[in-house]
Amino acid sequence: MEVNKIGGILSVLLGLIFVIFPMFSASVVSIIIGLSLLFFGIIIVFSGINLKNIINILSLILIIIGVISIIFGFLFIFYIDAISFLFGIQFYIVGIIMVLFGISGILSKFERITLTSIMILIMGIITIILGAFSINNPIYVAIIIGICLIIEGVALILSD
């Protein structure tokens, strides 16, 4: 069996787990990200302390990044909804950019660009709505991730 097919099957299975058990999946992902950030932050703080005698400014930057990583690590471990909030903010930013591109394309009045711009505007509005849903409920983020994993898995399985 090819690597793409195996990856596709695993992606579909993981996507189904995300769709069927969204709260569990969101919790596990949040805890894994939190632990990763926590360990990364600890390593970076120690690296910054070790470089203190060699390069002061780099040492300070590493310590600051490490402390921020540790804070976000604890945030993701103990506050599961934090990841949904970040996804929601990302949806809002992307949605606003799409809406602005859509409006600017419509105002340009080129026929081919206008149709595409209307589609971008509609997708931007949908993205902003998804942002609102994902901030309010982490289940939506897990389901969206699951659907994306299933689509990617099917694409990998069908690819030659």
Image (cartoon, rainbow, N blue to C red):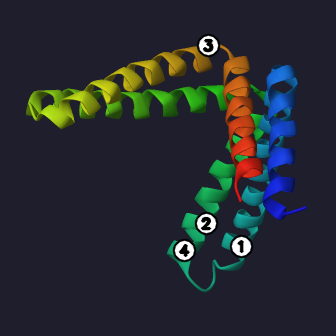
On screen, residue 15 versus residue 130, left or right, reads right
Which-is-in-front pick, marks 3 and 4? 3
Q: Position of residue 146 (x, y in %)?
A: 74, 31
Quarter of image, res 123: top left
Q: Quadrant of residue 138?
A: top right
The spot of residue 132 in percent (x, y) is 52, 16
Q: Residue type at mark 3: give it.
A: Asn
Choose between 154 and 91: the one closer to the eye: 154
Assess whether mark 1 and mark 4 are in contact (beta carbons under 8 angstroms).
Answer: no
Q: Amino acid at mark 1?
A: Ser
Position of residue 155 relative to residue 142, above or below, is: below
Residue at the image point whose x is 69% and y is 46% from the top: 155
| Element carrying mark 1 | helix
Q: Residue at x 60, y 86 (%)?
A: 54
Q: Quick one: quadrant of the C terminus?
A: bottom right
Residue denoted by label 3: 136
Sequence-first tag of 1 and 3: 1
Q: Which residue is mark 4?
A: 58
Rendered position, 153 above or below 44:
above
Q: Identify the mark nearer the N-term, 3 or 4.
A: 4
The x, y position of residue 60, in whole percent, is 56, 67
Asked if residue 75 can be seen in this view, the reply is no
